Amino acid sequence: MRVLLDTNIVYWWFYESFRLPPASVSIVKQATSVFISSASLWEIAIKVRLGKMNVEPARLLELIDATDFIELPVTFRHAILVADLPLYHADPFDRLLIAQALREPMHLITSDRHLKQYSELVIEI
């Protein structure tokens, strides 16, 4: 199974692993490929700049690079799919992650129960 981690899961994985349910860790460890969207790092960088997160983005990138996780760039095809998504959720970053999961396809691992409405590809932990 190919999985995409949502931004909160990325943060928890590297900084607050105690918040990850054991089932989510198991899913990640059993996955054939684990992806992190460039949109997640963009979102984190914005939150750092706004004072909403206390993370050093360059250090986070180093931590990611030390894993087998794969960067998932945002493509034109991901971006345009956002226009077709129902408005179950207004957050632009979450909507882009949903579009990426649908387009690739891959399972999106998230803690946001609202995202489950989009697809059976969403795994809420």
Image (tube, rainbow, N blue to C red):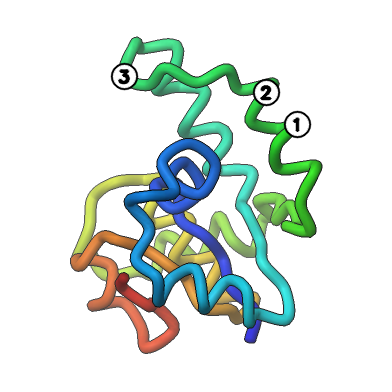
Instruction: Please tell me the numbered disc located at residue 88.
Output: none
Up-down relation of residue 64 to residue 55 (above or below)? below
Q: Residues within 10 Å of mark 1 (few under 14, many from 20)?
A: few
Q: Residues within 10 Å of mark 2 (few under 14, many from 20)?
A: few
What kind of element bears circle 1?
helix
- What amino acid is labelled 2 in the image? Arg
Mark 3 against mark 2, which lies toward the viewer? 2
Give the residue pinned by disc 3: 52
Q: Earlier in the sequence, mark 1 or mark 3?
A: 3
- What amino acid is labelled 1 in the image? Glu
Q: Residues within 10 Å of mark 3 (few under 14, many from 20)?
A: few
Give the residue pinned by disc 1: 62
Contact (Cβ within 8 Å) of mark 1 with mark 2? yes
Give the residue pinned by disc 2: 59
What kind of element bears circle 3?
loop
* Left or right of 55 on screen, residue 112: left
Mark 1 against mark 3, which lies toward the viewer? 1
Who's the residue at 58% across and 78% down the image?
106
Who's the residue at 48% across and 30% down the image?
44
Q: Position of residue 77 (x, y in %)?
A: 64, 64
Q: Position of residue 18 (x, y in %)?
A: 37, 50
Q: Nearer the viewer, residue 21 or 58?
A: 21
